[in-house]
């Protein structure tokens, strides 16, 4: 089938099942084109709670679809590729976090949204890269256990020096592999470009950037920036959205910044998932109940950028 015929069939089945398609900013262009909503983790979490659709097709990775299910337990949530996992989310498990919490009983636990449902269930509140600083600032405890991303934790610690962050040693490989040398090299080729990087990047990369933003923070910034050229220090998929929404501006991706798991979702897989309403996200009721509270607290705080 051609890309157009696939998209047409998806639209028909979407209407038949009263479904909504959510796509993360890192998805392939053809997936973004069929989505009802495109955004970052927080945006899509909020959209998931506001849709009246009976079926949510989540084009992203596992923890995102789990969050949608937690917030919409009565809806059918589908992840088109069951193997689209987040390696960073797998770097912390509930048993290890429970043991760590015992060492710091007075500390608040802030779980980055890039975690499993079981880990979220142990947290006091969740956060995204967009509102991580805001979330940590609002906690009453002086000590904060932050899981699982070390680089985001270090970024938040710099912004909130009055707190002591106990940072888990996880990383997003896609962002961690972005190097200072790579940014410097591109900056030499494009001296007038603004450098925007994600807070999951290493501290030395953030230090030489003009701004550190979540993906939606980047989307919002480039709309109002007088600059016409941007080096985008996050997963390449974001550049497609930026180009569509900002004609006349140039966006330079980093060759190394590709998340293979985000690229697993294809039109064929989305179509198949709507044909059979599988694979569905299934979570134990008690886990969903416990994990909903920290997610809801995060959403109540709103964005931070």
Image (cartoon, rainbow, N blue to C red):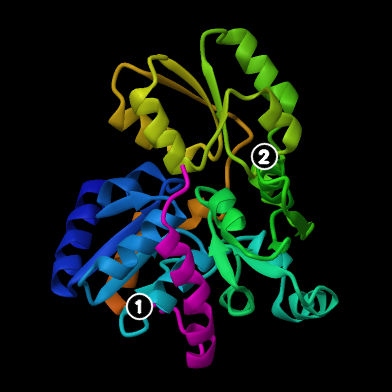
Viewer-side residue, 154 vs 14: 154
Task: Give the extent of the magenta segment.
Answer: 278-305
Judge from the rendering whether residue 210 lies leftward or rightward of residue 104; answer left or right. left
* Local secondary structure at mark 1: loop
Please, which residue is most extreme toward the right here?
Answer: 103
Q: Residue at x 45, y 58 (%)?
A: 60
Can the viewer see residue 25? Answer: yes
Can the viewer see residue 2? Answer: no
- Main SS of the magenta part reads helix
Q: Residue at x 61, y 56 (%)?
A: 136
Which image quadrant for residue 235?
A: top right
Residue 187: percent from left, percent from top: 61, 14
Q: Earlier in the sequence, mark 1 or mark 2?
A: 1
Q: Residue at x 53, y 84 (%)?
A: 290
In this view, 28 is above or below 97 = above
- Residue 285 is inside the magenta segment: yes
In this view, 44 is above or below 152 = below
Residue 184: percent from left, percent from top: 69, 17
Residue 179: percent from left, percent from top: 72, 30
- Residue 215 is inside the magenta segment: no
Viewer-side residue, 303 vs 112: 303
Quadrant position of the N terminus in the picture: bottom left
What label sits on residue 3 in the rendered view?
none
What label sits on residue 72 in the rendered view?
1
* Local secondary structure at mark 2: loop
Q: Residue at x 44, y 71 (%)?
A: 296
Compute the Cα span from label 1 to label 2. Answer: 32 Å
What label sits on residue 201 in the rendered view?
2
Viewer-side residue, 94 vs 106: 106
């Amino acid at each position: 089938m051609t890309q157009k015929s696939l998209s047409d069939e998806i639209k028909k089945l979407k209407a038949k099942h009263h479904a909504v398609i959510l796509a993360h900013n890192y998805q392939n262009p053809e997936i973004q084109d069929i989505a009802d909503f495109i955004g970052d983790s927080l945006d899509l979490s909020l959209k998931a709670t506001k849709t009246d659709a009976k079926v949510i097709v989540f084009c992203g990775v596992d923890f995102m679809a789990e969050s949608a299910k937690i917030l919409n337990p009565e809806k059918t949530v589908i992840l088109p590729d069951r193997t689209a996992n987040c390696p960073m989310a797998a770097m912390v498990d509930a048993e290890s976090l429970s043991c760590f919490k015992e060492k710091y009983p007075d500390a608040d636990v802030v779980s980055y949204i890039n975690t499993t449902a079981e880990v979220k269930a142990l947290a006091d509140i969740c956060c995204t890269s967009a509102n991580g600083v805001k979330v940590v600032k609002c906690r009453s405890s002086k000590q904060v256990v932050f899981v699982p991303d070390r680089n985001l934790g270090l970024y938040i610690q710099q912004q909130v020096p009055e707190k002591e962050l106990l940072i888990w040693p996880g990383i997003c490989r896609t962002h961690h592999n972005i190097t200072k040398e790579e940014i410097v090299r591109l900056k030499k080729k494009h001296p007038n470009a603004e450098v925007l990087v994600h807070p999951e990047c290493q501290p030395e990369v953030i230090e030489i950037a003009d701004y550190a933003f979540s993906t939606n923070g980047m989307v919002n910034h480039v709309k109002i920036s007088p600059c016409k050229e941007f080096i985008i220090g996050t997963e390449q998929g974001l550049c497609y959205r930026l180009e569509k929404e900002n004609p006349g501006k140039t966006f330079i991706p980093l060759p190394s910044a590709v998340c293979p798991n985000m690229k697993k979702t294809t039109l064929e897989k989305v179509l198949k998932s709507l044909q059979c309403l599988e694979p569905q996200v299934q979570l134990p009721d008690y886990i969903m109940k416990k994990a909903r509270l920290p997610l809801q607290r995060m959403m109540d705080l709103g964005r931070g950028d």
